Image: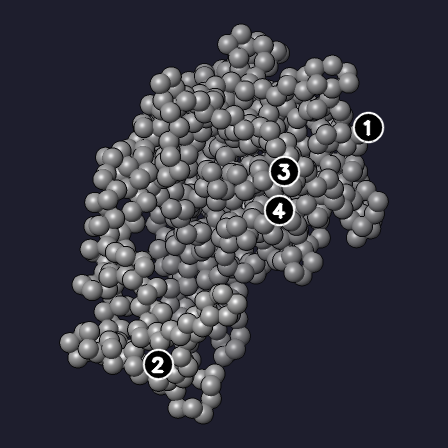
Amino acid sequence: MGHDDHGYWRIVVEDKLREGEVEGDYFEEFNYLQNFDKGDENPDLDALFKKMDDEYWEPGEDEYLKDPNVFAEELYNSIFGSDRGLIRQKEDGVEDECLDDIPDAQTRYEAWKACQKDKNDGKLPPIDIIDDGSDPDHLTFVDDPVWRKRVLEKKPPLKYWEYLIKGRKAWERKYSPGIPHQGRVRVYFHTPEGPLERVPAWATYVLPDPDKSRMSAIFWDPPIEELHVWRNASPVVSRSLRIYECHVGISGKEPKIASFNEFTSKILPYIKKAGYNAVQLIGIQEHADYSSVGYKVTNMFAVSSRFGTPEDFKRLVDNAHGLGLLVIMDVVQSHAASDEMNGLAKFDGANDCYFHRGKRGHHKGWHTRMFKYGEYEVIRFLLSNLKWWVEEYHVDGFQFHSVTSMLYTHNGFAEFHEGLDDYCNQYVDRDALLYLILANEMLHQLKPEIITIAEDVTLYPGLCEPIDQGGLGFDYYVSISPSVMWLELIENVADDSWSMNQIAETLSLSCSQHKGKGLVYAENHGQSIAGGKSLAEVLFNYNHHNEYSSSGPSSIRRGLSLLKMIRLITLSLGGSAYLNFMGNEFGHPEYVEFPKSRNQYSLEHAVRRWDLLDSGQHSQLAAFDMDLMSLEEENSILKCPPATIMLTDDTSKVIVYKRGNLLYAFNFNPRKSFDKFSIQLNETGEYKILLDSDELAYGGLGRRSSEAKSILTMPARSKGSLHNLVLAMPSQSAQVYKLSRIWDPFESL
């Protein structure tokens, strides 16, 4: 046991010699990462050293290695001469040795050169020293270029020590491990209140005990053949992020908890095919309560054992990288489970080991524990946690869950109506603010291309500003306002009463805030999992008996039309990165419900209906979403500057805008189509249609099928005036155009 500089007590559990084995000598070393190494061949050390000398030294260069006394004698003779001219004097019965006068250095050096020339068949030493006598501290060295070239081209000598290292199999024959692979570990505390047992705070793999009564840390040290070998480097960060959000456990179509391996083999290839370039995983950190979706974390450093082993998760990340997918992890450091048996709560018996005391130590809505971000050890623990996921599992980024609950002592349960005063009052947790700055600084130094995303509904000022400019340093922030708006409109507002100005302003604001670093989505996991409904569930009027209801104002065609338009306008107008929760791209109609007591712990609704991809409107929605992702990939829509709104008309229900070199036209009118809708443009030329939500392949009516694929602007009457582009805009449809050719009609006049 030892006490380190950080105040930690560390216990070293040493491996034990097996019966009949003896400790090795000083040079004995084992390579624990290879079954066999060069030392297992038990090489002859004398032969090894001879081979090293023979390969490195030229003939004659190793003369001093054979007898080190020769070197000392030669050095003495070169300084004092071989005829030492000793004179013995007897004084008081003691014989002393005296030397003749020692020649000056130049004389001795010239004599040494002559001696070397005689010994080497007339060849002078390869280096000469010239002293012109002007400066005793300045000597000029001249070397033989042939000798220099030979020396510089020499390879390093044989690394003999590599031939002394033995592999893991030799270690296993000699020692038995102090803690074997998959050995169970718990921490035992002696406290004034009595003994306590806890799961180690830094546990990297946790499993329930055989009797299911409690959890234990698992010492994870698998045999080499079971260790994952990384094959793929992280992909280069794309110009824009198209994120596919997933929960591994509900990613299967069967009513069971899906595994990392199933996700790797079945879901990752689908994500790549669907056109996304990043996968965001929720619920990866270990959580004892599966119904919490992974947001009540008990073990910060451990992958959820429900889904597989640490090696399984590494394999998932590695395969994702091989497909060109970035892996972003939804990390929970804003709060932790109040589970005292398996988590960090009252870890050492006290109520303030990692968390605040009293009311401040408890989240006001989730009954979880709130970290003390001002404590050195808590900061060290949380920063180490982020570094662990980057270095051990090669993740490419983090979405910081519920930054709002970190930033404010009221956890975000307050009205924000005082402007900047809301962000500068006594309710702001300055320790949490500084921790987030430290976390971003550390992560971007550790891995400059890493991606950090803040989930903050209050839009804290400076959230995505650089740290050296006073900001918090996040790369993106999550903009929830579009998803809130869409659900409100669909559930509570008639189609012909939708406000085009509201839609355009809400989405434009998401794109312009925080330097346009908004991550937008039409819907994420929250609407499907947190007791809500997906947009498809509302639009398709899908009931909980897994049937489409024929009653109500909704229709399949209306649902298809609006889902396509909502996704297109959210991506193209709303932000700089786009996210979709798994299954929503094809209109997953069922709600998600994790196993709880109220449903008798059923997994029936903790699944994804992948079978719907082969049926009707769901396959058509998937086809549209795939082409939308291709459109973004080819035109880098999300990296373009914010859009220029050209028209928002609440009467006609039309929105038209430009972003980059693309023109977007939306007709939200549920009944009225426009055969000739005129748009005024500054440019004149030819516009080519790239995407039409009304195509038959996407479940539309194909009402533009007879229209030309390219449209010419109408020439202006006078130079400098605006030009007209006349569009056909079917009801509840959207089109995307690209200016393919530009010309000035007045040039020929």
Local crowd size for mark 1, using a 10 Å CA cut-off: few (<14), some (14–19), many (≥20): few
Residue 114 coordinates in the image, percent (x, y): 25, 81
Q: Residue type at mark 2? A: Arg
| Mark found first going from the N terminus, 4 or 2 | 2
The residue that disc 2 covers is 108
Left/right placement of residue 720 relative to residue 194 reads left
Can residue 359 be seen here? The reply is yes
Tell me what residue is drawn at x 27 percent, y 33 percent: 40
Q: Residue type at mark 4? A: Ala
| Mark found first going from the N terminus, 4 or 1 | 1
- Colour convention of the picture: one colour
Callout 4 touching callout 1 (CB < 8 Å) = no
| Mark found first going from the N terminus, 1 or 3 | 3
Callout 4 touching callout 2 (CB < 8 Å) = no
**Which numbered tag is attached to residue 439?**
4
- Per the model, the C-alpha gap separating discs 4 and 2 is 65 Å
